[in-house]
Image (cartoon, rainbow, N blue to C red):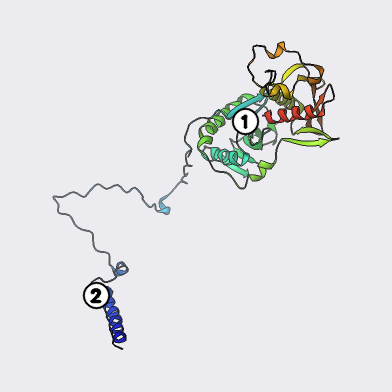
Amino acid sequence: MIKKHLIFVLFLFFLTSCSIFGGPDGYFPDKKYDFLEEEIEEEIALPGSLDSPNAENHYPVLNLEDIDTILEVPKPRQIFASSGDSSVQLRRLGELMWIYIETLPSTSWPISKNYWDTSVYEVTNADPIIGEIEVDYNADTKLIMKVEHGIKEASSEIFLYQVNKVTDKIESNPEFIQSEMEKIVEYFASSITNFSGTSLAAQNLNEMKKANIFTEDGKTVIALDLNFDRAWSSVSRALVAANIVTNDRDRNNGIFYVSYSQEEERGLFGLFGGGSTNVSADEIILGEEFQFQITITEENNKTFVRASSKSGNIEESEQLLSKINESLS
């Protein structure tokens, strides 16, 4: 019983002590709303012998009625550190130019968008679904940038077109396009290594690959979403990158004559796989079982790459096409 009375007394003491210490008349009153009752006092008049401090207002509030002209808000500066990257290249095939980037389009898109957002030009349209940015360049010209998936896995290609506003047709001006694309290359090279973001809206571009493999009559075929000229150039570059010996080529009929062997690639003879040998590839003659034809044909705005063995070795043909596909860029 005594214990209950003691607890009750302590409880009452706790309640009264709260008002004593924190109430309006307590030792530590709550004054967080006192400013609402404050009145504006008159400015302090300084004696004539003292000067007013020369304080600059860094955040002046303008009276809209006093503004005669429209103010242009400056656009933000580039936010990426400059460090350079060799995985960004400007490539050219005839008058066709594009920027090759070793990163997915969903990463290339926000960097491309930021390039124009931090420029002096106005972005009139930006659609991440199709990877297209439209820029108002001047009174007569607009620029259209297209971000696409590259031939190589997890790569991007950027194209830039000069369009006449009146006719809405693409104009041929290689010198101008190259000059503008060189600026974009520099921007990407200084941005991409320190940029880790990706655009969820542009994820669709990652699936729009230009190189796909399918089976036709039990044989593997590479389908390229390219015209013949560029497909020929890409396959030629891939053969060099994969260390596949080209014995001859017939561009009119779209045929590469090559020598290839999985055994050679593994270094058993030291020809293709980088094994130690003092004999060059041109000095070694492989038998008929190692001779292949790479055929490139254009059908319905697509280009198809097929491989056939002189000896009919289907497995080796499949491996050869796989090697070419890995080296496409």
Image position, residue 198 (x, y; %)? 57, 44
Residue furthest out toward the left:
49
* Spatial CA span between label 1 and label 2: 73 Å
Q: Quadrant of residue 234?
A: top right
Q: Is residue 144 left or right of residue 295?
A: left
Image position, residue 326 (x, y; %)? 69, 30
Q: Residue drawn 71% across and 10% down?
A: 283
Determine which residue is flagged by label 1. 100
For the residue pair 236 and 77, the one nearer the viewer reads as 236
Question: Type of residue at label 2?
Answer: Gly
Determine which residue is flagged by label 2. 26
Placement of the N terminus among the 4 image quadrants:
bottom left
User: Which element type, helix, strand or loop, lies under badge 2?
Assistant: loop
Residue furthest out toward the right:
217
Q: Quadrant of residue 137?
A: top right
Q: Quadrant of residue 317?
A: top right
Q: Is residue 195 left or right of residue 231?
A: left
Instruction: Confirm whether residue 121 shows in the render.
Output: no
Q: Residues within 10 Å of mark 1 (few under 14, many from 20)?
A: many
Q: Residue drawn 74% across and 22% down?
A: 261
Q: Residue drawn 36% across and 50% down?
A: 60
For the residue pair 130 and 3, the one nearer the viewer reads as 3
Image position, residue 147 (x, y; %)? 64, 37
Placement of the C terminus among the 4 image quadrants:
top right
Question: Type of residue at label 1?
Answer: Tyr
